[in-house]
Amino acid sequence: MQHSDTVLVFFGYGLASFAMGLVIVVVLSRAARSPLALALRWLAAFGILHGAAQWVLMAQLVKTAGVTVEGSILMRGLFLVLSGLSALALLVFGVQLLDGSGGRLRWLRWLPWALVGLWVLGVLVPQTTAGATEAALPSEQLCLDCHSDAAAAYVTASRGWVTGVDIALRYLLFVPAALLAAAGLAAQALRFRSLALPGAARESGAAAVTLVASGLVTGAVVPPGPYLPASVLNYATVTATIGFAPQLLWIVAAGALALFVVRMLGVFEVERRQQLEAAVIEERERIGREMHDGLAQALGYVGMRSSVAEELLDRNQLTKAREVIESIETAADEAYQDVRASILELRSSDVTERGLRTCVQEYCEKFALATGIAVDVEIDDGRVRRMSPLVELQVIRIVQEALANVRKHAHAAHASVRLGWSDHACVVSVSDDGRGFAPEASQRPGARFGLNTMRERAQGLGGALHVETAPGKGTTIEATIPHAERE
């Protein structure tokens, strides 16, 4: 292979791996936390680190004509570090997929670190301290068979201790990592099939097969070495057998893996659509309940009191009729305010497009303008987490219902809304300076309908609702909700 062709091979191989890692990062930034999403973070790390490692070698090849032996060794050393870290990430990815369903394979969690420790203590440290003997090096001519126009500095550096460490890294880390990750993807394919996601199952299975092939062409086919199997299965022997450099197969394997993984990531879009559909159904049910409990009852009351007013007018009891009509006006005004509030809630709930932070801020601003109640909003921007659409919708609903209680019952002049995140949960609180109430009153059946609804929303997502209040002391409602939906 000509030197310029080798540079292109390493560039293409690194680009395919690096691009796969970046795409996974972008997709996961919009996905809910789940065992699969957590595992895919490690596959993203593998792609980025592995791509960077190939570009280090590419940079060495580009500059090899003017680089000293020591400089080349430094570059190869960086390549080994990046390759080792990428293999570790791929090992952890496979372990998390296999252990993600029930924790039956907890012992596998130690395997990545055991293999890395074996490579570092058993190969890297002895090689770097003792160096490679002449007998342990491939012949210079064998190196030049693959690097026909490479400079002597590159060939000399390739024949040092770094080659032995590189071979051991592929045998001890990359091949087991590829096989373990392939097993994890195969297990994930079965999970997808059980969830009636045949497309995702197909792509996951194809990615598993591709990883096995990648483990063979990238991990098992190594630079020439004096020991088995590197003395038999290496770049030179494979090139002589198939007629072209095996590094070309790296690009094919990396490109296929990137393709199948990216297509598999479509499962997160399916999950998002399902969550949106569930949110729409839940929203319809909520609107139906609110119309029944609010507007329908108000209209029934207005109709009944109107009949009473009509009878009073027929009897010429004007004073009593006026009182009834005033009660009708009050009920109609309350119904009007409720309808306006419902419209405001619907307009301020598009969390899928604008995000939870924006929706909370806009709703509080419009609520303050509509009601005259001042609302302070405090959001912890430093720890904002994007959650699933259904979870974010429930959070904004809790804020809306808490402020609706402030409007209807608190007689408050000021309210505050705080939104923050801990390591595992979203925490939202709504406080007011109103008249408060006795805490035990909220525990009676049928009492404080809004509080019960908020509590059901929080508990339905695996969270909890805490109420702190007392007569004349105002009220604080705090909901703690896990980042992802409870499985």
Image (cartoon, grey):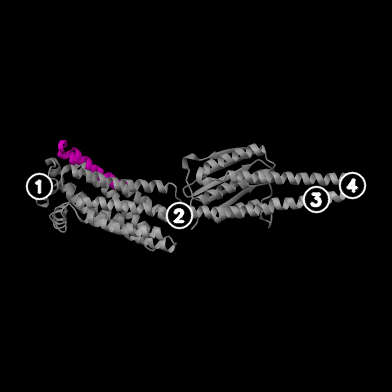
Residue at screen point 84% across, 44% down = 322
Cα gap from disc 4 to disc 3, whole angstroms: 15 Å
Q: Main secondary structure of the magenta part?
A: helix
Cα gap from disc 1 to disc 4, whole angstroms: 117 Å
Task: Find numbered disc 3 in the image and state the secondary structure of the residue it sits on.
Answer: helix
Indicate the position of residue 85 as horizontal and vertical percent values.
29, 49
For marks 4 and 3 on the same chain, the one whose residue lies earlier in the sequence: 3
Residue at mark 2: 270
Task: Find numbered disc 4 in the image and state the secondary structure of the residue it sits on.
Answer: loop
Specify few, some or many for label 2: CA neighbours under 10 Å numbering under 14, 14-19, or 20 or more.
few
Specify few, some or many for label 3: CA neighbours under 10 Å numbering under 14, 14-19, or 20 or more.
some
Residue 288 shown left or right of residue 62 in the figure: right
For marks 4 and 2 on the same chain, the one whose residue lies earlier in the sequence: 2
Residue at mark 1: 140
Task: Tell me, yes or no, whether the two marked residues, 3 and 1, touch with CB atoms within 8 Å.
Answer: no
Residue at mark 3: 305
Question: Label 1 is placed on what type of residue?
Answer: Glu
- Number of callouts in the render? 4
Task: Find numbered disc 1 in the image and state the secondary structure of the residue it sits on.
Answer: helix
For marks 1 and 4 on the same chain, the one whose residue lies earlier in the sequence: 1
For marks 2 and 1 on the same chain, the one whose residue lies earlier in the sequence: 1
Q: Which residues are magenta?
A: 48-72
Question: Label 4 is placed on what type of residue?
Answer: Gln
Cα gap from disc 4 to disc 2, whole angstroms: 65 Å
Closer to us: 158 or 325: 325
Q: Which mark is residue 317?
A: 4
For marks 3 and 1 on the same chain, the one whose residue lies earlier in the sequence: 1
Q: Is residue 112 magenta?
A: no
Cα gap from disc 3 to disc 2, whole angstroms: 51 Å
